[in-house]
Image: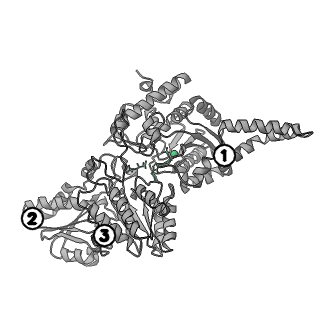
């Protein structure tokens, strides 16, 4: 039996000698590589955090001590050490274990995470609650250097530093976000002097001071006493000391004994402490060390060859159908070549949003602001206020945290910002923290906002060109994954704002759909027509403003309406249609809304989830038949 198989909980781990820990680290790495090569997942981040995870679990007593991982994508070793080795093969699969930490999954998962930069605030909240309950157990928040580019992290540091609460923050600094990290903080962190260079500087400086005639010895003694503040000055410690944290580091985050010793020491503190560790993203698997960007979030791969990383924007040979993201990225480059006003903004996700190509072709019109979605939106508002056409490419789920910036800094003055909401709808294995199922609702209620969703990748290109030519805030939301396999017509005319498309006419029932689910509506209509029904299908194209004329005109000809969206029902597209019908006294129609009920969607393959949560063709047919059979 391997060492890993002997571990059910922290006590089992503590029974091992320190000499056994490197062996265990290798077993953990092998297990992670083997499983992720089959399931896909966040390989590089988890490989980089193996020794740090082992040291934390070795020194602290989980779940009594609380460990919060930032994002949680680097927590595979944590899962393996907390009794989930047997289930680990189900990582991110339907009904399997989550790809992030999740309170409901395991008592050692102190907080449910997935969105970046929450660990310090959550850790401080837990530490403050423990303090009020006279609970002296420890709280450890582990945050990456990328996640430290978000303002939320500083809001947490700011309060923590003024609170005297017993909080340990560990900065896992691998100089990488998903892409190489960006921003002044990142370069400040990279400014660290190595322990060796500090040592030799210290020695030379000491010799020089002692050589000063008459005063040498006194000055040397004074310098010795102030050495710590000197060290803080030349290392990133200055930043964290300013937040009133006791700073330790930077230390090698792969040296287990050193990590354990320093954590044992830090454990004795009862005020805010920050330990800065330096790690290598992808550590222990050469293809991931060499290409941590590709192996940040990877699909299944061949462990031996490592797999040649296909670029996300260009269709890989075996992916004949370009993804929505790839079409977005290539259309952006076409538009930018014709329109100098167009700039692209990403929040630390150039590859995921398809903007890598744009960044290489138009480096001066590309802005990676780091994990800082609120800032990205207000930054775009500023640019738009001076005549630019900023395209802010942020996943739907991550845009949720920039709601006020959209309202306050863009829509009040109707600045022409284009919101490219990728990963709209069910995203799949990333699960409830990542599905983009709320964007119609949180955008629809904002005056001056326009919202579109394309039926396929060709319409995405048309909508993007429409958006750039629109003089106001406009959002287009599109799904994760391959397009529908339609031809891309690059010179197709742009759309009239608020105008939908009548795909087919019919009298028995009207199916009103928006976004990718228009394909599900068409499939459902085909089945219903084979059963003798006359079915109208409308591609609404716009969630706001609705095509009032087309919808009311078509509703007048039928008594049954089904609306379809890959979005929560409350406040979504179907709600907007109900409001339109009611506001126009259209009461002769019976309406069924197909969409996500009032629940969070779990993780798993998109196809399975679309079926389970009833946003596929079968659900449309069932809703239609309920109305048609009602007589
Ligand atoms: C609010 C938010 N924006 C973007 C992301 C996507 N994302 C996940 S991990 C990551 C990079 C995190 O970098 P770092 O914290 O340094 O962790 P590492 O992967 O380097 O271990 C990003 C941008 C996210 N999860 N949450
Ligand atoms: C952990 C995280 O938030 C990102 O890595 C996210 O998983 C990327 O999602 P995609 O794989 O859809 O780009
Ligand atoms: Mg990092």
The residue tagged 2 is: 533
> Does residue 405 appear in the picture of this structure?
yes
Between discs 2 and 3, the one toward the N terminus? 2
Assign a secondary structure to mark 1.
Answer: helix
Q: Quadrant of the C terminus?
A: bottom left
In the displayed orientation, state which residue is furthest to the left: 532
In the displayed orientation, state which residue is furthest to the right: 214
Q: Which mark is residue 542?
A: 3
Q: From the top left corner, tell me how far across and down residue 288 is, in percent.
A: 44, 39
Q: Is residue 188 above or below residue 197?
A: below
Q: Could you tell me how far apart the alpha carbons at marks 1 and 2 are, in whole angstroms?
A: 71 Å
> Which residue lies at the image location 62% right of the left edge and 54% below the top edge?
158
The residue tagged 1 is: 237
Q: From the top left corner, tell me how far across and down residue 342 is, in percent.
A: 43, 68
Question: Between 50 and 443, which is closer to the camera in this rendering?
Answer: 50
Question: Between 491 and 571, which is closer to the camera in this rendering?
Answer: 491
From the viewer's perspective, tell me whether residue 546 is left or right of residue 157: left
Q: Nearer the viewer, mark 2 or mark 3?
A: 3
């Amino acid at each position: 039996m391997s060492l890993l198989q002997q571990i059910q909980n922290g006590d089992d781990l503590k029974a091992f000698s320190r000499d056994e820990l490197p062996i265990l680290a290798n077993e953990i790495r092998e297990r992670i590589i083997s499983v992720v090569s089959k399931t896909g997942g966040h390989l590089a981040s988890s490989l980089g955090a193996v020794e740090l995870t082992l040291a934390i679990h070795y020194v602290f007593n989980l779940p009594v001590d609380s460990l919060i991982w930032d994002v949680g994508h680097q927590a595979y070793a944590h899962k393996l050490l907390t009794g989930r080795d047997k289930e680990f093969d189900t990582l991110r699969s339907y009904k399997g274990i989550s790809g992030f930490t999740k309170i409901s999954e395991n008592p050692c998962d102190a907080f449910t995470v997935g969105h970046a930069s929450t660990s310090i605030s959550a850790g401080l909240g837990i530490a403050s609650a423990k303090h009020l309950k006279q609970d002296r157990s420890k709280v450890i928040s582990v945050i990456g250097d990328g996640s430290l580019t978000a303002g939320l992290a500083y809001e947490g540091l700011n309060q923590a530093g003024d609170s005297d609460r017993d909080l340990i923050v560990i900065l896992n600094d691998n100089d990488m976000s998903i892409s190489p990290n960006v921003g002044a903080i990142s370069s400040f962190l990279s400014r660290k002097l190595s322990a060796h260079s500090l040592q030799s500087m210290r020695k030379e400086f000491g010799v020089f001071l002692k050589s000063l005639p008459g005063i040498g010895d006194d000055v040397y003694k004074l310098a010795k006493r102030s050495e710590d503040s000197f060290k803080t000055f030349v290392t990133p410690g200055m930043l964290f000391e300013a937040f009133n944290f006791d700073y330790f580091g930077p230390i090698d985050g792969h040296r287990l004994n050193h990590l354990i010793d320093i954590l044992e020491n830090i454990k004795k503190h009862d005020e805010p402490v920050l330990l800065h560790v330096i790690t290598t993203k992808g550590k222990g698997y050469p293809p991931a060390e060499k290409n941590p960007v590709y192996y940040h979030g990877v699909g299944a791969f061949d462990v031996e060859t490592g797999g040649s990383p296909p670029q996300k924007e260009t269709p890989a040979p075996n992916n004949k159908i370009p993804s929505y993201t790839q079409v977005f990225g290539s259309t952006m480059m076409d538009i930018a070549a014709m329109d100098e006003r167009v700039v692209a903004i990403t929040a630390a996700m150039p590859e995921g949003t398809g903007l890598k190509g744009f960044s290489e072709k138009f480096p001066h019109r590309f802005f990676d602001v780091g994990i800082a979605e609120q800032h990205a939106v207000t930054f775009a508002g500023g640019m738009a206020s001076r005549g630019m056409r900023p395209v802010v490419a942020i996943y739907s789920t991550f845009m949720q945290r920039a709601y006020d910036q959209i309202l306050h800094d863009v829509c009040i003055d109707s600045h022409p910002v284009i919101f490219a909401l990728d990963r709209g709808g069910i995203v799949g294995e990333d699960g409830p923290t990542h599905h983009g199922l709320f964007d119609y609702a949180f955008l629809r209620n904002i005056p001056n906002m326009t919202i579109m969703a394309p039926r396929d990748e060709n319409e995405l290109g048309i909508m993007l060109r429409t958006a750039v030519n629109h003089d106001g805030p406009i959002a287009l939301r599109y799904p994760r994954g391959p397009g529908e396999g339609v031809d891309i017509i690059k010179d197709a005319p742009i759309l009239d704002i608020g105008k939908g498309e009548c795909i087919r006419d019919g009298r028995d029932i009207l199916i009103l759909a928006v976004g990718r689910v228009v394909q599900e509506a068409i499939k459902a209509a085909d089945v219903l027509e084979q059963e003798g029904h006359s079915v109208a299908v409308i591609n609404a194209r716009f969630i706001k403003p609705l095509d009032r004329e087309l919808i009311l005109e078509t509703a007048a000809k039928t008594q049954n309406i089904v609306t379809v969206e890959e979005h929560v029902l409350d406040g979504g597209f179907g709600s907007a249609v109900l409001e339109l019908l009611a506001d126009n006294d259209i009461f002769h129609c019976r309406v069924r809304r197909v969409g996500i009920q009032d629940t969070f969607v779990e993780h798993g393959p998109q196809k399975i989830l679309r079926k389970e949560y009833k946003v596929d063709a079968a659900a449309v047919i069932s809703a239609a038949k309920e109305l048609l059979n009602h007589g």
